């Protein structure tokens, strides 16, 4: 099979790593890819949102199946365009991708399908939003831009002033352009977060093993939110009982509800969950794999990933039974100076060519090859070092041994990736 993988981040490098293990693969193309994916397939210089060019490329190169990494092309309707052109593609169509593209749409669906989530109200007028905040008089309160805001559209306001500022930034000062003209205001949830992804072909939904992200830039969950500074899997906060509840109360009602409403969702469902006293509550859904969680989830999948994708494309997921190994996997993200507010491009990265043991590898994200063939920084999250082993403790140690081999000016990384998981092990 000829496969086109769309995206250029660490998530896509991690997906590519699995795809090349498949006996079903003939050629892997990645658009636009990064220096890590270039080692596994052929990078194609087409951006992830140039949908017309991606369709043309797929036709010219006899692509059998396209896999979409990031949310932007899904929300723009890449799946509809490919299918109109008779091309097979994995991902929700434009309507179904509203699950991530509009928080209002997603919250209304959760309410309609009885999926546990924070109490909320939506607003398209700033005065009404402020009146609601005053009437609630309960802090923290959570203010969210409705549309895609590159992970920056959520404010957890501790005071009325902060809440009003968030409303004004989004609705009056157009901080998120169109994406912020409607907002969702919701109740603050406390507990421990986890990410659980599922494969679905629209009929059957098959959850993956859980992971935990580390969203804040600094150790001990301090500082601003980022796209994710590291992840580990399994996430012991997800006990077998919690996992069953997530399937019965969240994933199954979602797909059943979509079926009843005639919404055709296939691809990946990402549930961002808060676990509080053993009860899972949905924070949000995304329409794709998470980054960096994918880097720690997919290495544990023993079933051939391309076989799973093909089962989604042919709606035969019910005939497949997925196997996972019981290793622990850890990914430590190395970010560039200034991240998450800004990022530095063109800084030389040293130490990448050092040999790594079989149970540790480097995932490229914001990297580029310079004209003189050095690997340089090219974005906020630059690299991830992934380690896999029989224990979480061992995998953490191994990942940090890998991090210590890499050096670039201004690099930032957290030193506590996976530590929360160790705390759990101590308690049961
Ligand atoms: P989202 O973009 O909706 O995933 O929100 C980004 C992050 O904000 C989440 O991962 C949580 O850490 C936090 N967050 C969002 N909604 C809530 C909420 N209702 N209560 C507490 N934290 C939240
Ligand atoms: N790591 C969270 C996300 O991919 O949205």
Image (spheres, grey):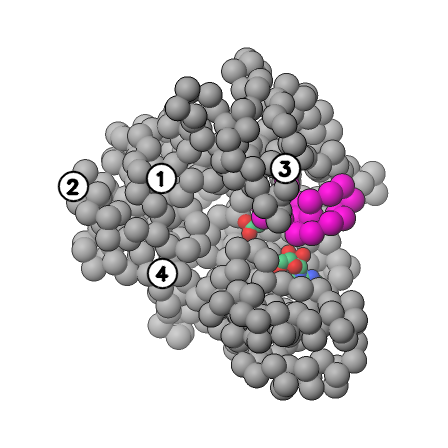
Spatial separation of the CA atoms under disc 4 and disc 1: 17 Å
Rendered image quadrant of residue 173: bottom right
Residue 173 can be seen, yes or no: yes
Checking the image for residue 76, the label placed there is 4
Camera-near label (2 vs 1) is 1
Residue at 33% across, 61% down: 77
Task: Give the x, y percent position of residue 398.
Answer: 67, 23
> For the residue labelled by badge 1, is the local secondary structure a helix, a strand or a loop?
strand
Establish if 355 lies above or below 416: above
> For the residue labelled by badge 4, is the local secondary structure a helix, a strand or a loop?
helix
Establish if 159 lies above or below 386: below
User: How many labels sit on residues?
Assistant: 4
Please give the range of residues in magenta: 209-230
Establish if 85 lies above or below 229: below
For the C terminus, the image quarter is top right
Checking the image for residue 60, the label placed there is 2
Residue at 25% across, 35% down: 1
Spatial separation of the CA atoms under disc 4 and disc 3: 31 Å
């Amino acid at each position: 099979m000829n496969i086109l993988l769309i995206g250029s981040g660490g998530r896509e490098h991690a997906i590519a790593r699995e795809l090349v293990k498949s006996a079903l693969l003939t050629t892997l193309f990645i658009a636009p890819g990064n220096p890590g994916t270039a080692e596994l397939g052929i990078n194609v210089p087409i951006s992830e949102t140039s949908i017309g060019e991606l369709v043309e490329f797929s036709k010219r190169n006899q692509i059998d199946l396209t896999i979409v990494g990031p949310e932007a092309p899904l929300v723009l309707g890449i799946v509809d365009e490919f299918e109109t052109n008779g091309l097979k593609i994995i991902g929700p169509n434009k309507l179904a991708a509203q699950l991530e593209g509009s928080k209002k749409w997603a919250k209304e669906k959760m309410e309609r399908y009885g999926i546990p989530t924070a109490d909320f109200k939506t607003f398209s007028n700033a005065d009404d939003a402020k009146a609601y905040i005053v009437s609630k008089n309960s802090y923290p309160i959570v203010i969210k831009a409705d549309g895609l805001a590159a992970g920056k559209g959520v404010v957890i306001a501790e005071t009325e002033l902060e809440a009003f500022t968030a409303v004004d930034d989004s609705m009056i000062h157009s901080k998120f352009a169109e994406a912020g003209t409607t907002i969702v205001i919701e109740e603050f949830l406390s507990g421990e977060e986890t990410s659980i992804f599922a494969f679905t072909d629209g009929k059957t939904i098959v959850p993956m093993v859980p992971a935990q992200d580390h969203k804040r830039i600094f150790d001990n969950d301090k500082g601003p939110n980022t796209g994710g500074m590291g992840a580990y899997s399994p996430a012991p906060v997800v006990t077998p009982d919690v996992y069953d509840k997530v399937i019965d109360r969240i994933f199954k009602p979602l797909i059943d509800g979509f079926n009843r409403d005639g919404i055709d969702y296939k691809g990946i469902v990402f549930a961002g969950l808060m676990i509080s006293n053993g009860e899972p509550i949905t924070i949000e859904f995304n329409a794709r794999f998470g980054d960096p969680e994918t880097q720690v989830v997919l290495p544990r999948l023993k079933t051939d990933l391309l076989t799973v994708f093909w089962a989604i494309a042919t709606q035969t997921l019910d005939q497949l039974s997925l196997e996972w190994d019981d290793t622990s996997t850890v990914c430590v993200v190395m970010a560039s100076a200034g991240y998450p507010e800004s990022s530095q491009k063109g800084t030389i990265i040293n130490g990448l060519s050092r040999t790594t043991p079989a149970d540790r590898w480097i995932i490229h994200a914001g990297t580029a090859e310079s004209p003189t063939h050095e690997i340089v920084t090219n974005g906020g999250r630059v690299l991830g070092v992934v380690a896999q082993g029989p224990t979480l403790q061992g995998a953490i140690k191994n990942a940090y041994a890998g991090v210590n081999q890499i050096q670039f000016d201004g690099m930032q990384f957290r030193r506590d990736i996976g530590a929360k998981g160790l705390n759990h092990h101590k308690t049961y």
